[in-house]
Image (cartoon, grey):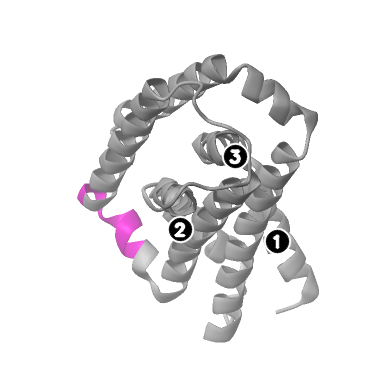
Amino acid sequence: MELAAWITIATVCATGAASPGPSLAVVVRATIRGGRVEGALTGLGHGIGVGIYAFGAVVGVSAIVASTPGLQRSIELAGAAYLFWMGVQTLRKGGSGGLGDDLEPGQGRRGFIEGFLVAFLNPKIAVFFLALLGSFLPVDAGLGERAGVAGLAMAIDAAWYVFAALLLAGSGAADWLRRNGSWVDRVMAILLFGVAIFLVVAGGRG
């Protein structure tokens, strides 16, 4: 593969990762709740979830997901249920989070799992990487190059969300969010509910 192809793929992956959505909301919520450590672990978990689909596209697993309407719909509904559950939990614990770096037992693991599930329960990522491989990878690209693209996508996604968590935790915005934690939690819950409803309604039409 030529350098230009790698740069193009990296740019597309970075643009996709930086797009606002439920993933960013979950990372922000984890950072407000547990500080930079939990936020970073949430971003890392999300990157690994994305990496599974990226590597799946290399070996053909993503093609199976994308071409099997029943399977894709089941994952969408599971994702919607998980996002709805997270919204409920956010409302129940509204304003109780902090921005410290001392994690309670299991709190970092909780953030990692949340980040992973938000990515893994989003079959649209599988479609994204199938389109990416089909559009930007040369037809004669070897397995090593395809695996390299998948690894690059995973690294870019994880790096972006870890960076977002660290930037938020180290900025003045973090203090403002902490002071207004109850309102922030309500907004986050509404966003999570909205995305869950969108997955149920719009996903069934896709």
The residue under label 1 is: 10
Q: Is residue 184 above or below residue 69?
A: above
User: First in sequence: mark 3 or mark 1?
Assistant: 1
Nearest to the observer: residue 122 or residue 90: 90
User: First in sequence: mark 1 or mark 2?
Assistant: 1
The residue under label 2 is: 49
Q: Is residue 80 above or below residue 176?
A: below
SS class, disc 2: helix
**CB atoms at circles 1 and 2 under 8 Å apart?**
no
| Count of marks placed on residues | 3
* Residue type at tag 1: Ala
Side of 181 relative to 197 (left or right) = right
Please report the residue visible at 56 percent of the width from the left and 76 percent of the height from the top. Answer: 146
Q: How far across and down, in percent of the image, does residue 30 sit? A: 53, 39
Please report the residue visible at 61 percent of the width from the left and 57 percent of the height from the top. Answer: 158
- Check residue 119 in the rendering and tell me which mark sits there, or answer none: none
Mark 3 or mark 2, whichever is nearer to me = 3
- Check residue 31 in the rendering and tell me which mark sits there, or answer none: 3
Q: How far across and down, in percent of the image, does residue 150 sit? A: 55, 69
SS class, disc 3: helix
